[in-house]
Amino acid sequence: MPPEPDREGYLDYKAKVEKGDSALQQRAELDCEKNPDTLSTALACYYNLHLTEKNIVKSLQKRDQDVIRESASRIKHIRHPAVRQEVSSGIEKLAKSWDAAKFGNHQEHIERHDSSIKKAIAKRQEQNPGESPGKSWVWAKLDVENRHLGRLEKYDKQLLEGIDNWIEGARRAEAKSLAAQVIARSRQRDHGNDNDRER
């Protein structure tokens, strides 16, 4: 019978992979790909948990200044300088607010981490009385980390939607302004033609 996942097994897997054991990581990835819904082997569980932790770190590496810098290439296509400046300021405020909220949420996650895992273990063991504490720990940690990653991704999605709204709003305003200018010129031209005919 294959070994069940447990805390010590995960910590050992994580240490080896982070020291460069790519063969172990590839084996775990294959196990995970075979049964992605059930994570039926210890290695598949370890791979999934480690990947989730890495994705959390990756999400936290993106900061407000990165977002502002990335959106600058989109903002520069706004023709009107005053509108461009307003959008730039709006995105900067949005990014700073996002940064504070996201990292505040992560700080809360760190503070509640151990108690969240203990609660999740207790819940699992109540539902699965025969499950070993080590296996419950792996599944509880995976659940807690996945929920946290989901919250971080939600912050990122909301930020991107906010940036899109600022930029699309500016483009619509510019298009509307341009259309109004074209209509005004057309009317002036028509009015000029009417005056010429009257003469």
Image (tube, helix red, strand yellow):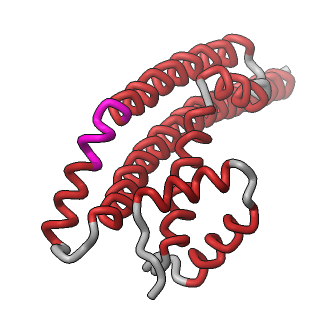
Residue 136 relative to residue 198: left or right: left
Does residue 78 lie above or below 132 as drawn?
Answer: above
Q: Which residues are magenta?
A: 110-117
Image mark count: 0
Q: Position of residue 191 (x, y in %)?
A: 75, 25
Residue 115 is inside the magenta segment: yes
* Rendering quarter of residue 65: top right
Residue 187 in view (yes/no): no
Residue at the (64%, 71%) spot, across then down: 29
Residue occupying the far left of the picture: 126
* The N terminus sits in image quarter: bottom left
Q: Position of residue 86 (x, y in %)?
A: 61, 14
Residue at the (41%, 57%) spot, across then down: 7
Does residue 91 lie above or below 28 as drawn?
Answer: above
Residue at the (75%, 30%) spot, across then down: 182
Residue 48 relative to residue 5: left or right: right
Q: Position of residue 159 (x, y in %)?
A: 52, 35
Q: Nearer the viewer, residue 4 or 62?
A: 4
Q: Nearer the viewer, residue 74 or 46?
A: 46
Q: Position of residue 181 (x, y in %)?
A: 72, 25
Residue 5 in view (yes/no): yes
Residue at the (62%, 32%) spot, across then down: 62
Does residue 114 lie above or below 74 as drawn?
Answer: below
Q: Taken as a whole, is the magenta stretch helix, strand or loop? A: helix
Residue 114 relative to residue 12: left or right: left
Residue 43 is inside the magenta segment: no
Q: Nearer the viewer, residue 180 or 69?
A: 69
* The C terminus sits in image quarter: top right
